[in-house]
Structures are given as structure tokens and as C-alpha cells.
Amino acid sequence: MSQQIITDEETMVDGYCEIELGAGSWFYNIVFATSDKYDTEFVQIQHLRSRNAEIPMKRFNVNKNNVRILGQGLIAFADANGL
């Protein structure tokens, strides 16, 4: 399975990262977002079926203060399990 993280300076400035999984049919988008209702900032991880999908299949919101901890935890999990 091929995996590719697609970023460039222009999209990173906008708080966006795209991770392509497999043969280009599944994507994760990582987006910096703001809640109008609660006036807070957070990071949203979106699971998309295709690059052009308008509605994500799944969404996961992470407090912006916990993003680095989540990333380090995922890396530690992958290392411990030989992934």
C-alpha cells in the first residue's frame, strides 16, 4: 500500500494537510478550523472517500493544544507494534 503526504507551502499556510492512502482512493485531510458557536480553534481530521468528496465520511476534532501529543502517541504506537 502506497502512502503519501501531500503538502506544499501554500496549503500549509492555510492550515491544511492531505494524506493519501492506498491507490489514491482514500484520503485523510487535516484542517485547522474555528467553531463559530463556541468561538474556539481546533484541528479536524477528516476521512474522505475521494479527493473531491464534499462531505467527509468521518470527522474527528482535536483540541489544538493536544495535536502534538496525539501525533507522538501515534508514532509511539506504530513503533511498538512494528507498523
Image: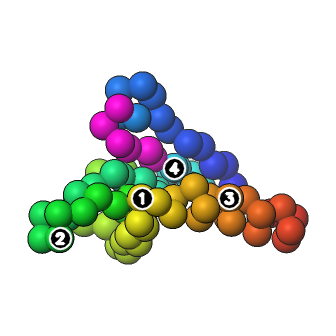
Quadrant position of the C terminus in the picture: bottom right
Q: Please, what is the three-letter code of the amino acid marked with disc 4?
A: Ile
Who comes first in sequence, dot 2 or dot 4?
4
SS type, badge 2: loop
Image coordinates for residue 70, horizontal then vertical, percent:
59, 64
- Label 1 belongs to which residue? 64
The answer to whether residue 48 is visible is no
Find residue 19 and name its label.
Answer: 4
Nearest to viewer (mark 1 / mark 4): 1
Nearest to viewer (mark 3 / mark 2): 2
Q: In the rendered view, would you say 56 is above or below 51? A: below
Residue range of the region highlighted in magenta in the rendering: 13-18
SS type, badge 1: helix
Q: Please, what is the three-letter code of the amino acid marked with disc 1?
A: Lys
Distance in Å between CA atoms under marks 3 and 1: 14 Å
Distance in Å between CA atoms under marks 1 and 2: 14 Å
Who comes first in sequence, dot 1 or dot 4?
4
Q: Please, what is the three-letter code of the amino acid marked with disc 2?
A: Tyr
SS type, badge 4: strand
- Label 3 belongs to which residue? 72
Magenta stretch containing residue 56, yes or no? no
Q: Is residue 55 left or right of residue 3?
A: left
Instruction: Report crowding for label 1: few under 14, some 14 to 19, many 20 or more residues within 10 A (C-alpha).
Output: some
- Label 2 belongs to which residue? 38
Nearest to viewer (mark 2 / mark 4): 2
Q: Nearer the viewer, residue 41 or 13?
A: 41
Q: Is residue 4 left or right of residue 72?
A: left
Image coordinates for residue 14, horizontal then vertical, percent:
30, 37
Q: In the rendered view, would you say 43 is above or below 59? A: above
SS type, badge 3: helix
